[in-house]
Amino acid sequence: MNKLNILLAASEVVPFAKSGGLADVAGALPKALKALGHDVRVVMPRYYVVDKEKYNLQPLQGELGVPMGSMGKAWAGVYEGVLPNSDVPVYFIEHDGFFGRKGLYDENGEGYGDNDNRFIFFSKAVMQLAKKLHFRPDVIHVNDWHTAPIPVLLNTTYANDPDFKNTGTLLSIHNLQHQGKFYKGAMDVLGVGWEHFNMHELEEYGGINLLKGGIVHTDAMNAVSKKYAQEIRTPEFGWGLDGLINAKAYKLYGILNGVDYDEWSPAIDEFIPQTFDNDDLVGKAVCKEALQKAFNLPVRADVPLIGLVGRLAEQKGITLLSSAIWNLMEMDIQIVLLGAGEKWAEHFFSDVATKYPHKFGCFIGYKNDLSHQIEAGSDMFLMPSLFEPCGLNQIYSLRYGTVPIVRATGGLDDTIQNYESTTQSGTGFKFYDATPEALTGTVKWAVDVWYNDKEGFEKVRQNGMKQRFDWAEAAQGYEDLYRHIIGGRLSSVHQ
């Protein structure tokens, strides 16, 4: 079949800059699409954390002019590199005023006051870059609110631009909670005309909502798991946009993220003390001992070790965990936690570690090598999320023989099958209610199986280690969706 020209725009891409799962997708999906034979280009901002020397980024000749409405024309530099272990080009939009800062979106928990201008600028720069490169995309794949202005621009400012004559758009929603809500004056910078500032397009409660505009104007939207695609249509998970999403449900899809097994596989992981696989788990015992030592916990093979890695944010169920922790500490278990986020949670879990030094280990911050070591050395992995669009750690855990204990929401529900003792089927332990009691009860259940049904626990572990969530499969789903979008646009042109 004919190859597609795909332009993927994202505010963060692994390994250059990351705050969440969006970066993992933006770093892995393009490589899988390239393997299918497509011409894929990636665009992201050049934040200060992106090291030009380390990644051998080369400047593109000439500046990029970006029309910023009432702010006049802004000028950007462009650097070019590649995604590691690939020849997929990545273009970095450089503008010291907008991106020459410590953080991606915020500093010390405070969002930047000009995030509207920063990402309207980035969205427009993506369009201008395509023109500069003479790259005519069949599809521009945009992600979350930061690049949601692109479908709006394509249908307005660039509607009659021959470079984008047949270009379609796909908007991926990685987290609906964040929508890009700003003062209505951002309309003058967006420059698409105030006639689009209405309740059916960009306006919401007197302000501008960039994600809303993207949802209205994109050809198709994708939530990053089938369950999340269903959930965002409900008031509980819709964050005020469920009515709009239901109205646009005819163009809503749910493609589950894949996992980069080149990085996340215990058989080849360079960050863990000893590699292992499902036919030889000796290395896993070595990893568990090393993990216990790293967190100054008693070295015991005869106690279940439960790992947690993630942002200490309300979404991740940290309030549930904080309410349940004292009951958990009464059990004969060990817990290790790696994460940073809300200050109260950082202090709270540090206090738990002080009170229970033999049972609870805590590292506030993020260390990539330590996250691998926790996946490899833990017996179980806990994810009590209130909502989880896809989730990746539970999928990593399966591969590492670390049995997931999850709340059945979003991608967690899609990827984990509940343990069934009679058939010894299933890949983990799930609870449904977002309550401390449900969390505690399910941990008790998993721990009981660990202590009293060794054969059953081993079966769950083996079931999980055989699971695969490859990017190749996800990329095929995206390719099918891209072709559907292009077909729809072409048929509307010829009608």
Image (cartoon, helix red, strand yellow):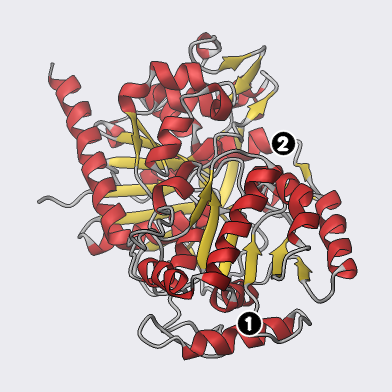
Disc 2 residue crowd, few under 14, some 14–19, many 20+, Cα 10 Å: few
Q: Measured from the top left, where is residue 451 in percent x and y? A: 57, 72
Residue 315 to residue 394: above or below? above
Disc 1 residue crowd, few under 14, some 14–19, many 20+, Cα 10 Å: few
Q: Measured from the top left, where is residue 300 in percent x and y? A: 68, 85
Q: Amino acid at mark 2?
A: Asp
Q: Measured from the top left, where is residue 92 in percent x and y? A: 52, 57
**Nearer to us in this view, 152 or 373:** 373
Judge depth for marks 1 and 2 and give the one in front. Answer: 1
Specify which label sits upstream in the sequence, 1 or 2: 2
Residue 343 to residue 173: above or below? below
Residue 242 to residue 79: above or below? above
> Which quadrant holds residue 224?
top left
| Circle 2: element type | loop
**Nearer to us in this view, 329 or 318:** 329
Residue 4 disc label: none
| Circle 1: element type | loop
Residue 210 to residue 86: above or below? above
Dividing the image into 4 quarters, which one contains the C terminus? top left
Q: Which residue is mark 1?
A: 302
Q: Which residue is mark 2?
A: 114
Give the residue at the far left of this rendering. Answer: 1
Q: Give the side of residue 99 with respect to residue 122, left or right.
A: right
Q: Give the side of residue 231 with respect to residue 163, left or right.
A: right
Residue 16 appears anywhere in the view = no
Q: Amino acid at mark 1?
A: Asp
Q: Give the side of residue 324 with respect to residue 231, left or right.
A: right
Residue 190 appears anywhere in the view = yes
Q: Measured from the top left, where is residue 41 in percent x and y? A: 36, 55
Residue at 86% x, 50% y: name it. Answer: 344
**Nearer to us in this view, 463 or 458:** 458
